Amino acid sequence: MTDYTTIDFGSLTALSEDEVVTHSYVRDVPLSGGRTLALVTLDNSRDHTRPNTLGPVSLLEYAKTLDALRDRAAAGEIHAVAVTGKPFILAAGADLTKVDEIPSREVALRMGQLGHYALGKASELGVPSFVFINGLALGGGLEIALNADYRTVDASVPAVALPEVFLGLIPGWGGAYLLPNLIGIENALKVVIENPLKQNRTLKADEVLELGIADVRFPSVSFLEDSIRWADDVVSGRVKVKRPNEPGKIERLVKWDAAIGIATKMLKSRIGTVPKSPYAALELLKAAKSGTRAEGFEREDEVLADLIAGDQLQASVYAFNLVQKRAKRPAGAPDKAVAKRVTKVGVLGAGYMASQLALLFVRRLQVPVVITDIDQERVDKGVGYISAEVDKLLDKGRISPDEANRLNALVTGTTDKADFADCDWVIEAVFEELEIKQQVFAEVEQFVSPEAVLATNTSSLSVEQIGAKLAHPERVVGFHFFTPVAVMPLIEVVKTPATDDATLSTAMVTAAKLKKTAVITADTPGFVVNRLLAVLLGEAMRAVDDGTSFATVDEGMAPLGLPMAPSQLLDLVGLRVGAHVLDTHHAAFPDRFYRSENLHRLADYGKLLEKDDKGKVTGFDKGALKIVSGGKNPSTPEEILARLQDGLAREAKLMLDDRVVAAAEDIDLCMILGAGFPFQMGGLTPYLDRVGASEQVFGDTFHHPPIRGVDA
């Protein structure tokens, strides 16, 4: 086994000259019976606004601190050690700012080894070790806690997670071995695999306790005092810690491999096989059911080294930086100071999409929301849907009874648009026809103030034309959500030539309050995501019309790593909507976008896929396949992929030339957050550079130098 004490970590510290160091400060706290607790507080003291991160210098200082405490414990000076963080933050994980400068696999290997060397010392102190999770604990921050003997959690902790597979890594400082052996394999799969792939979902304090990651939870107002008192009780023997989720023999013999098998099938169906890190994490979790801690740590070292030295991490870091940094400073956004206040929201429509929007607005903005439709029956159905969704949130413990009552009281329905008179923000979500959208805006304009924002959720129509007949077109803006509204993080904010800065700023500020990422786009068919998906669907239907099977088309486009195949995408958005999207783009750009008569026939027929009683796809509908049969020029998967890559490169370049968005990074951000383009591939434009499509189509690349990444 690896002896971490003999390793020279100088190759890492050489990369860390400008590291913002998280220091380890120690103070002694008296316990009962004359005992002493050494309390270590992690604090990036140079910048109190920045989360604690764990770079090489920080880890070596932490290790040195624990070595000194081990010596004090051996001398009888201290009887327990506890680690906590500065206010509201334990640690946000490894410092990855220099990860793209790691020159070799050998240096990459040191990253895992240093984490194990430093964090692992918490189990070698000779006295009980505790971690008081007082705030944010992500990645290595949570692994600090996992390496200790006991854990407490603050009841108001905002986020606890192991997000590594989301970034193209694995929990490599003990997490892949320690977590399943603490909380069981099924719970560990949720934390390590499932949550990161659900838009990087994090855990709140209640879940941390329920899963068994923490042994006890205390209120914020007295968290440190309660944690110290509890640690005193544990050290003195007054409290015995029981962990019901710790795996026993039956779980290891029967459930473990079965759970891994189910998770593997789920991964393949959801993300394909292009991303490496989720499958690497699965293998580590599988191996964690047996063997020693040292063996588990050594496995993590090797896998982490492979991933850091590989190409997918650099692509993931590029994508992660887009989401974390560019998303917070959107290109072209006006000054927030000119944004209008939104004190009441009106929703034109009461169907499924409109009701989802109304629910999101009332939850996030906590202001009155009124919905309307053409008759009272539709209005009542919309209000009923919202109330039922609020009840579900209450049943799941996501909101309190008081909040549920408040939300329900804020939502009203009406058939009289005069009830919209005091709305500051009105959004339409009616049928995707220009005349209908123009009509509902014209009807409501006569009641609302000239300053009220009129937002359209159109996915492909001209926002300028939607507002063309209004007295005040300057207050019209596109506000395009993706479904499901509560989950998808992107909003395309569409600026027309008439949209003024106050309206655009209001849209951007409102998107942020809705906890969405907004990208500003020009008013052009399909904006960004649907324009590029129209390329994909057009190439798919062209191949099918020429005699290629849907199965072959799905196979050909699989290397893009999108969450679903073209056939499933058509089924999700609806065949009629898919036909409408292609028609809209073909009408705007007939030389570049394909129109499929067969897709209209499929829409009239009504289905493409066969499904079982639970909605699981079992194959293609035979009647649908008969409708599209007859083509005489089928394509191979390779030909389909090559045409698609060239088509995507062409449209992305034209978007930049026409200033649809400010930069290639905005296209990538939209495709990652709106279409599920894999993080590990680094966004669409780096992918097109790597496969040669950029060079083939316009003789250059989107990025200089091209961003590395691995593609199937």
Image (cartoon, rainbow, N blue to C red):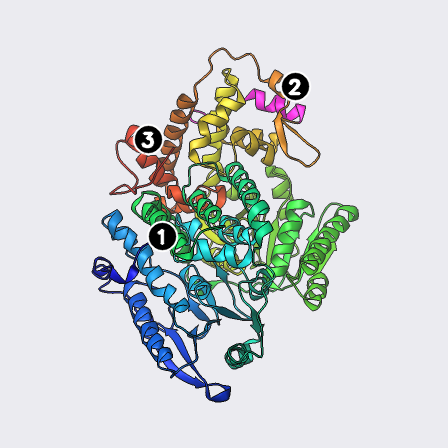
- Quadrant containing the C terminus is top left
Q: Which residue is mark 3?
A: 693
Image quadrant of residue 557?
top left
Name the residue at the right extreme. Answer: 377
Residue at the image point whose x is 36% and y is 78% from the top: 74
What's the residue type where badge 1 is placed?
A: Glu
Residue at the image point whose x is 69% and y is 48% from the top: 350
**Marks 1/2: CA distance?**
55 Å
Mark 2 Cα-neighbour bin, 10 Å: few <14, some 14–19, many ≥20: few
Q: Are marks 1 and 2 in contact (CB under 8 Å)?
A: no
Secondary structure beneath label 2:
helix
Return the mark for residue 253.
none
The one nearer the camera, 711 or 352, is 711
Residue at the image point whose x is 35% and y is 75% from the top: 70
Mark 3 Cα-neighbour bin, 10 Å: few <14, some 14–19, many ≥20: many
Secondary structure beneath label 1:
helix
Q: Which residue is mark 1?
A: 298
Secondary structure beneath label 3:
helix
Residue 43, x across and y down, in percent: 37, 74
| Image position of 353 (left or right of 464) | right
What's the residue type where badge 3 is placed?
A: Ala
Return the mark for residue 623.
2
Residue 600 magenta-highlighted = yes
**Marks 2/3: CA distance?**
36 Å
Looking at the image, is mark 2 or mark 3 earlier in the sequence?
A: 2
What's the residue type where badge 2 is placed?
A: Gly
> Residue 657, can we see it?
no
Residue range in magenta is 590-606
The one nearer the camera, 16 or 418, is 16
Q: Mark 1, mark 2: which one is toward the viewer?
A: 1
